[in-house]
Image: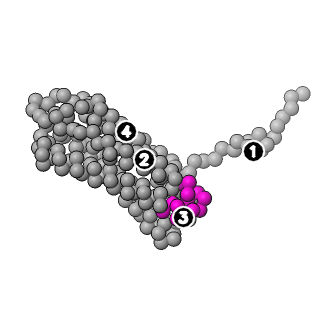
């Protein structure tokens, strides 16, 4: 006779639960945004080298090492902030969260300086040629996502500074941090396409 195991005992250890609405929503947002970025990346690569007039990427683009290091390292600091709030260390959370915001601001400042040089000195605007149109569209799309992420982090920092953010909110912080990791990962793709392959 075959032995049977009661269903409740079989599923006790590996019980399946519905994923949280926040994580599902963020996964949906990231999937949709990835599709948008993919379209812009493909357009950039498709039109690369098809200009009949300059300037070309090789003539005007400089690799933004400093801004890139700042942005990518911010993912490490936001992970430290996540860990801190999980353990209820609000002071440490504020510190690492603040460092993340600062690094994001430095990256945006570096992007602004790059654009100023390209527009004022190299006379590359969104209307100059196909390269200008694709460059400002792709890099500008990423910069807009950095700005959105920064605004969300600033709101979170306000809650942390006013005492409204506690350890029980750590899951919401994780969901927001996931967006920031996405922004950093997208920059790796944009950086490779624009400053390595496209140059």
User: Which quadrant holds residue 90?
Assistant: bottom right
**Whole-percent x, y for residue 61 in the image:** 21, 38
**Whole-percent x, y for residue 71 in the image:** 38, 47
Residue highlighted by disc 4: 188
Residue highlighted by disc 2: 73
Which numbered mark, 2 or 3, is in the foreground of this view? Answer: 2
Label 4: state its secondary structure.
helix
**Magenta stretch contains residue 135:** no
Quadrant occupied by the N terminus: top right
Residue at left offset 77%, top offset 44%: 8
User: Which quadrant holds residue 3?
Assistant: top right
Majority secondary structure of the magenta segment?
helix
Question: Residue 59, labelled with which disc?
Answer: none
Which numbered mark, 2 or 1, is in the foreground of this view? Answer: 2
Label 3: state its secondary structure.
helix
**Which residues lie in the magenta part?**
82-94
Upstream in sequence: badge 4 or badge 2 = 2
Residue at left offset 47%, top offset 57%: 96
Residue highlighted by disc 1: 12
> Mark 3 Cα within 10 Å, few/some/many (few <14, many 20+)?
some
**Magenta stretch contains residue 89:** yes
Upstream in sequence: badge 2 or badge 3 = 2
Q: CA distance from mark 2 to mark 3?
A: 21 Å
Residue highlighted by disc 3: 90
Residue at left offset 52%, top offset 53%: 80
Which numbered mark, 4 or 1, is in the foreground of this view? Answer: 4
> Mark 4 Cα within 10 Å, few/some/many (few <14, many 20+)?
few
């Amino acid at each position: 006779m075959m032995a049977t195991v009661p269903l409740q005992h079989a599923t006790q250890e590996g019980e399946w639960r519905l994923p949280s609405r926040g994580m599902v929503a963020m996964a949906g947002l990231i999937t949709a945004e990835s599709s948008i970025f993919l379209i812009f990346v493909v357009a950039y690569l498709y039109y690369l080298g098809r200009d009949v007039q300059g300037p070309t990427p090789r003539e005007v683009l400089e690799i933004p090492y400093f801004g890139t290091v700042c942005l990518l390292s911010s993912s490490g600091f936001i992970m430290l902030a996540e860990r801190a709030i999980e353990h209820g260390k609000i002071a440490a959370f504020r510190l690492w969260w603040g460092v993340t915001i600062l690094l994001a601001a430095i990256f945006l400042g570096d992007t602004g300086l790059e654009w100023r040089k390209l527009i004022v000195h190299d006379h590359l605007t969104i209307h100059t040629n196909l390269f200008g149109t694709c460059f400002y569209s792709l890099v500008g799309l990423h910069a807009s996502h950095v700005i959105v992420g920064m605004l969300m982090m600033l709101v979170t920092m306000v809650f942390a500074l006013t005492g409204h953010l506690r350890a029980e909110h750590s899951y919401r912080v994780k969901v927001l941090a996931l967006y920031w990791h996405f922004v950093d990962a997208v920059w790796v793709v944009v950086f490779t396409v624009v400053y390595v392959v496209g140059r």
